[in-house]
Image (cartoon, rainbow, N blue to C red):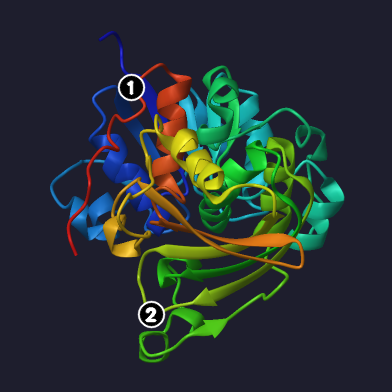
Amino acid sequence: MGEKVRAAIIGGSGYGGGELIRRLLAHPGIDLARVASIDSIGEPISSVHLSLEGQTDLKFEALSPSEAATGMDVVFLGLPHKVSAQAVPQIMATNARIIDLSGDFRLRDAEQYKRYYGATHPCAQYLDGAFVYGLPELNRSAIRTARYVASPGCFATTIELALLPLAKAGLLSGGVEVVGITGSSGSGIAPAAGTHHPTRSVNLRTYKPLDHQHIPEITQTLNLAGARDLSLSFVPVSAPLSRGIFATSFAHIDADVAPDSIRALFVDQYKNEPFVRVPARRLPEVAAVKGTNYAEVGLTIGDVQNGKRLVACFCATDNLIKGGAGQAIQSMNIMFGFDEKTALSDTGGWP
């Protein structure tokens, strides 16, 4: 192997940043050179990410985006929505590639961005074509040659993987209903009412029903993949988990499509994908993928009603890994010609 790829992380003190750091440190082709943050400046990485005690001498640094990116081959942005967009033009002025984990460059429509993220996009000129949407199972070829990647959201990844086989076959159209259950780490590292243990640990509650910011991202992605006039109704639910997403999507398929053909679509779509499993003897479970970059996909096919066959599509992921840092590293591996599974192939524990 030649010289290592030099990488920096901007926004490294959150949960997603911790997963990026952990896996990049273990990557044989990466030199993680800088971790920028607005918190814990000058403190060791392990002061925040306790599992990294003794694993690195890196410290959190107060760096501007251009300072963090100078001399780097790739920069990971672990910044909040609306903050990331402010940093991108400075990084583009350097020679570094960008993998952005925020939602700032996933949408192509500036009006949709304003509607769901509550702000006018500061550099809308980059929304249509500058960034490749980083879902490897759909856009692997485009990621390979990309300079800038917008890594998908956690709910979006999970729901898209569940429905992608139907979309690519042209069978997904009209209304789709989704219920997605998520763990508390998806709300970020800062304590809040929604993550407070005494209530979260004994509770189920919805938030942003029918109005979640991943709705236009999912609709856009599946329509580009082959769905027709997709309309998504999505209800997210907070669950007493620290990690994990379980999404159930209800699709209505033309009655003349045979159940065996529908099942075959899922097996064929994912048979060569390194990180998507279609279990043969069970349906997906969060505990089977927690702590890993793997997604599990499955389906149950119902009877025909009113000329349509109901298909319940399931997907389980770890929101911080396949739904976040791991998928970003998967895209990086593709961009720089590494084996796609490098630093990501661990299978986690059970249970």
Task: List the residue tagged with mark 1.
Answer: 339
Return the residue found at the far right. Answer: 111
Answer yes or no: is residue 269 visible.
Answer: yes
Question: Please, is residue 213 above or below residue 171 in the view?
Answer: below
Instruction: State the count of labels.
Output: 2
Q: Can residue 44 be seen in this view?
A: no
In-front residue for pair 336/157:
157
Residue 173 or residue 325, whichever sits in front? 173
Q: Residue at x 68, y 33 (%)?
A: 89
Given contact means CB atoms under 8 Å apart, are the residues at marks 2 and 1 in contact?
no
For the C terminus, the quadrant is bottom left
Residue 73 spot, x, y in % from top left: 46, 21
Q: List the single residue furthest toward the top.
A: 2
Q: Mark 2 points at which residue?
A: 240
User: Tag 2's secondary structure?
Assistant: loop
Q: Residues within 10 Å of mark 2 (few under 14, many from 20)?
A: some
Kindly identify the amino acid type of the residue bearing the numbered disc 2. Answer: Pro
Closer to us: 113 or 163: 163
- The correct choice, above or below, for 170 with respect to 69 in the image is below
**Image position, residue 139 (x, y; %):** 58, 29
Q: Position of residue 179 (x, y in %)?
A: 58, 70
Q: Give the mark, 2 or 1, whose residue is nearer the N terminus.
A: 2
Residue type for callout 1: Asp
Does residue 171 appear to the left or right of 35 in the view shown?
A: right
Query: Which residue corresponds to the image point at 33% horizontal and 22% vertical from the top-left?
Result: 339
Can you say whether 97 is above or below 346 in the image? Answer: above
Residue 159: name its quadrant.
bottom right
Residue 4 left/right relative to 75: left
**Label 1 secondary element:** loop
Structural distance between the alpha carbons of marks 2 and 1:
35 Å
Q: Which of the pair 284/216 is nearer the observer?
A: 284
